[in-house]
Image (cartoon, grey):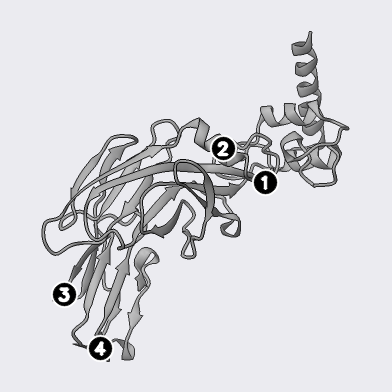
Amino acid sequence: MIDGTDGSELTVGGGSGTITNNGTVRIVVRTPTQTGAVYTPILAGTWNGSGTYEAIGGAWDDVDHEFTVSAPEQGTSGTPVSIDLADVQCVLIDDPTSGRPVGASFLATQSSTSLDFTATVLGETAVGDLKDLLEDDQGVRSAWDFTVSGGPNPDDPTYLSFDIGPGHDPDHLTVWHYDGDEWTEYEASDLIYDGTYASFSVTGFSAYGMITQCPPGDTDGDYIVDEGDAMTLAAHWGQSGSWAEGDFDGDGVVGPRDAAILAANWGFGTGGELSAVPEPGVLVTLLIGALMLLVRRSR
């Protein structure tokens, strides 16, 4: 397999050698960010063998040995999208609420092959059940349910691409699978994060959730460090607690070091990058303000 998501190439004999294929070579573009791009994934002078070249997320030209990335068919959560895999091999489904779409790259077919694809954002109940299984510093960044009718062999891989935004640590990304009754961790051995999309392959359609590590300072798992998190920290000041209560350094007590961690990450999620570390006076003002607001609310 050649992964063309990042423009990878296979060069044979400096580009003029002989490639012999008696099996199947798959060329994959996982995410719908290179729409219409044409590139040469294999550089060779002579092509031998009885094997085939398959394209996922685009079309393969056996004469010019070029791969053309498919323009995605656009859709919206919960609404079926119909495509012909001989012409279109990608779909991009928007989530109007979060603004984070999900993409799918399919295997191209030589003859007309109709496929109906539906991606639906998972509801709060299923997502809540998944959250209950995670560590305190983990959150559900994106969760979708997928259904397909028609299309090629169900054993052929499809690549799902979750838009999770920038700033995530690839080493802390995990995928969970939901069969309609329970969640289990999914072995996504080919999971790749390009700085926006996290992509992995599946051979069956059901529900999947993309799990990421929450930024330090984020108590509620919304991937934003803001006044709400400061209020949570202030409410548990001096008490024992978990990440969700403001214990970000893991020492078992919510205190000054946790406040410093929150301050260092203040503004995360509002613009994709961490803000500058606030001055000590800003941190004090932040905590005092949160405490005063809590006192006002209790009255």
Q: Residues within 10 Å of mark 3 (few under 14, many from 20)?
A: few
Residue 40 position by quadrant: bottom left
Q: Position of residue 135 (x, y in %)?
A: 67, 46
Label 4 or label 3, whichever lies nearer to me, is 4
Residue sitting nearer the eye, 191 or 98? 191
Q: Which mark is residue 135?
A: 1
| Nearest to N terminus: mark 4 or mark 3 | 4
Q: Which mark is residue 20?
A: 4
Residue 259 position by quadrant: top right
Q: Position of residue 3 (x, y in %)?
A: 37, 69
Q: Which residue is mark 3?
A: 62
The span from disc 4 to disc 2 (Cα, nearest Å) is: 50 Å
The span from disc 4 to disc 1 (Cα, nearest Å) is: 49 Å
Residue sitting nearer the eye, 99 or 89? 89
Question: Contact, CB < 8 Å: mark 4 with mark 3?
Answer: no
| Nearest to N terminus: mark 1 or mark 3 | 3
Residue at the image position 63 percent from the left and 45 percent from the top:
134
